[in-house]
Amino acid sequence: MASKASLPPMLDKRSFYRKPDVVAAYDRQRFGSPSGERVNAREIAEAIALLPPDGRILDLGCGTGRLSRALIENGYDVVMLDASDAMLSRAVPKVGAPAVLADAFALPFRPESFDAVVALRVAFHFADLAGLARSVAPLLCPRGRFVFDTYRWSPRSTFALGSRQWGGKVFIHSTSKIRDAAIASGLRIAEQHLCFLFSPYLYRLLPLTVVRGLDAVEALLPESARARAFWALEKFLA
């Protein structure tokens, strides 16, 4: 079972991802097709590529445990964390890693507890990226990394498309905003990977042959055309 920290009032997306029906449908709605499986594999690969080669990793906003399971398979020592008890109830039996019920903005760990913190499909749900970075930074060992992804553009940043399925709007975080948030927290941008021509939610609905074609086209287009960014912020040496 997950250990519990004191949670602040559940606002914005937190309450959405605590609903049992949302949790039950999460993986199927996003990755439940051959094209969705390809999106899942690519997201996980992008995140792992930005992590240190080994060490203790906090999977922040672990959801159903899809990334945690891959991290363990790659030899990492993993702790899972989510604000949704319903998510952790699915993740813990599937993954078997230690799990903590806590909020991303009030992390209950000692300073320098992790070699990296990774937050997959988390940061774009919150406007306060600087607050998230401030919460994560003390947990990192020197040269530790905070790995996360953002949207560079999305119709869902303007319109709450598919609110019942996807939970409403997302937030766009510019490079300058990320740089400012990093510096204010004692971090620096170490790496950035850009990917996906549009929201990967839509990739799941396309035939796999089309998705493969999009991947080929993506490699030929300028990086400005890509909708998602994966970031690694690194902690300054003390």
Image: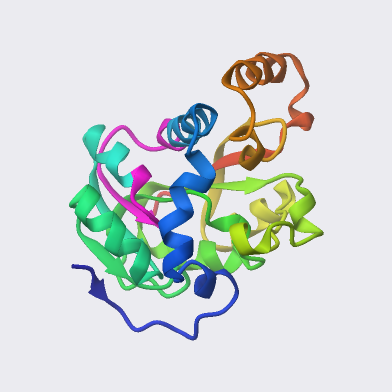
Above or below 173: residue 52: above
186 or 57: which is nearer to us?
Answer: 57
Above or below 72: residue 185: below
Above or below 2: residue 219: above
Q: Residue at x 51, y 75 (%)?
A: 15
Left or right: 76, with 153 as reference point: left
99 or 90: which is nearer to us?
Answer: 90
Magenta part of the chain: 47-67
Residue 54 counted in the magenta span: yes
- Residue 20, percent from left and from top: 41, 68
One can see residue 167 in this view:
no
Q: Residue at x 40, y 35 (%)?
A: 48
Left or right: 210, with 236 as reference point: right
- Residue 182, percent from left and from top: 58, 55
Residue 141 counted in the magenta span: no
- Residue 41, percent from left and from top: 44, 30
